[in-house]
């Protein structure tokens, strides 16, 4: 590939992973790149994601990996094939951050944190000549097509040869992703699907006893079933509901069901490692004067939280062993609502994929590209979010190079 003339100026709006990886590709090709960020520093949500261990991607087979993106999978597939989990691990290791595969198949840096990776990354970008314009809030375009930013109480106009929008979704707004970009895009006639919470918890009307006694406690082992799909994982009881990895993986269909029907009933298997027949056999043993809680602990292996859930709602427990086993294996949990967008891990909705060409350029705005979570796709936690964010950022950057230098070799 021939090097691009340095006279090309590219504006990358948004200092998250999609924007930073786009800036890396573009600056590495010789373009002059400025990253505009509303917050006082870049990568804030990236750092937050690394607090519990930075889950970069997932190691499962690609044929299964791509299914995690639901209806957006056909559009994302070529982008993820061009920058797949193996490539992301190699990129991390190129910054001095070796990775490892956890027991669940998730991929993490050995440092288990985001900060060492981000520091090395920013150093590389600075060496490449990337300029950072912090505290610059993008407000759209003026009548001459220039980018408009609010900065220091003033309104600035910027002319760019190409622009990449990478402003994130609308979850964790205090970290910079607040969805304010929707208005200037819809003003240009761009279709934007409503931003909704994704990978979020749900509300349940717990009794005072369960809420006061068990809020903050994990529920495991656990399998959850909804709409014919069963997933193993963990969940945690909150004062007003439930959250956790197993819940997040089902959040999209649960959200849609609640929007349609006003509630959704989730079936919880409190003993996923024991068959119904085996559990019923164990529950058929004589109680010998034991309390219900003691009997369920000894015969079924249930802890206090699981017993409390079985008793929730005031309904008596079945006395017949098989019926009680069925309750334990398929306990209904009625979800009454989704936690709000500002408390969600990620967001669904965004720029309709049909508004973008194969290079992620907006068809209505030649020279303007979009990447990351502001596009209309969603995925569960487990490394899928960051992987697609990186892949779309790279695709948009390559799209810019193709747009500015279509004849390059």
Image (cartoon, rainbow, N blue to C red):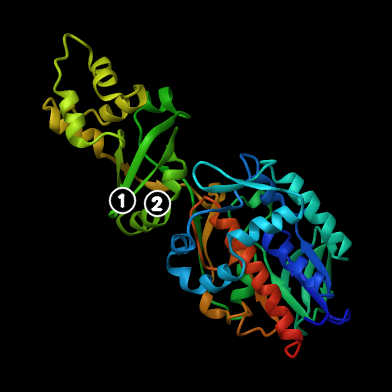
In percent of the image, x 35 and y 21: which residue is there? Answer: 304
Which residue is labeled 2 in the image?
250
Instruction: Return the x and y of residue 28 as percentages of the image width and height.
Output: 81, 70
Instruction: Return the x and y of residue 51 as percentages of the image width and height.
Output: 65, 40
CA separation in Å, label 1 and label 2: 7 Å
| Side of 101 relative to 7 (left or right) | left
- Please tell me which residue lies in front, 307 or 172: 307
The reply to whether dot 1 and dot 2 touch (C-beta < 8 Å) is yes
Q: Is residue 300 above or below residue 197?
A: above
- Please tell me which residue lies in front, 311 or 247: 247
- Please tell me which residue lies in front, 301 or 131: 301
Mark 2 neighbour class, 10 Å CA radius: few under 14, some 14 to 19, many 20 or more: many
The answer to which image quadrant residue 95 occupies is bottom right
Instruction: Return the x and y of residue 264 as percentages of the image width and height.
Output: 31, 49
Q: Which mark is residue 29?
A: none
Q: Is residue 368 above or below residue 329?
A: below
Could you say whether the residue bearing mark 1 is in a helix, strand or loop?
strand
Q: Residue furthest left?
A: 320
């Amino acid at each position: 590939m021939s090097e691009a003339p340095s006279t090309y100026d590219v504006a990358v709006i948004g200092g998250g992973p999609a924007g930073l990886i786009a800036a890396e590709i573009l600056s590495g090709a010789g373009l002059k790149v400025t990253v505009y960020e509303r917050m006082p520093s870049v990568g804030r949500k990236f750092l937050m994601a690394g607090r519990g261990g930075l889950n970069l991607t997932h190691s499962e087979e690609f044929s299964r990996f791509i299914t995690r993106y639901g209806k957006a999978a056909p559009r994302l597939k070529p982008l993820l094939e061009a920058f797949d989990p193996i490539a992301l691990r190699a990129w991390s290791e190129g910054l001095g951050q070796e990775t490892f595969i956890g027991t669940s198949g998730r991929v993490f840096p050995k440092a288990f944190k985001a900060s060492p990776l981000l520091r090395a990354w920013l150093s590389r970008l600075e060496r490449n000549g990337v300029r950072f314009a912090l505290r610059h809030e993008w407000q759209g375009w003026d009548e001459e097509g220039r980018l408009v930013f609010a900065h220091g109480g003033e309104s600035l106009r910027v002319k760019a040869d190409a622009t990449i929008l990478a402003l994130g979704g609308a979850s964790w707004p205090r970290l910079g992703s607040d969805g304010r970009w929707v208005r200037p895009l819809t003003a240009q006639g761009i279709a934007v699907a409503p931003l909704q919470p994704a990978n979020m918890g749900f509300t349940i009307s717990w009794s005072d006893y369960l809420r006061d006694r068990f809020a903050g406690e994990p529920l495991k082992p656990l399998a959850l079933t909804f709409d014919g799909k069963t997933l193993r994982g963990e969940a945690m009881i909150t004062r007003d509901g439930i959250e956790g990895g197993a819940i997040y993986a089902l959040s999209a269909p649960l959200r849609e069901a609640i929007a349609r029907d006003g509630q959704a009933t989730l079936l919880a298997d409190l003993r996923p490692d024991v068959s119904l027949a085996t559990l019923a056999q164990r529950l058929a043993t004589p109680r010998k004067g034991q309390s219900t809680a003691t009997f369920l602990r000894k015969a079924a292996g249930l802890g206090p939280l699981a017993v409390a859930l079985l008793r929730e709602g005031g309904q008596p427990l079945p006395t017949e062993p098989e019926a009680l086993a069925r309750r334990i294996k398929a306990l209904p949990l009625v979800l009454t609502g989704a936690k709000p967008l500002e408390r969600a891990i990620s967001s669904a909705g965004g720029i309709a994929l049909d508004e973008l060409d194969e290079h992620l350029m907006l068809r209505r705005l030649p020279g303007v590209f979009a990447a990351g979570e502001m596009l209309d796709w969603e995925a569960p936690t487990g490394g899928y979010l960051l992987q697609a964010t990186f892949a779309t950022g790279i695709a948009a950057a390559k799209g810019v190079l193709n747009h500015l230098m279509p004849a390059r070799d």
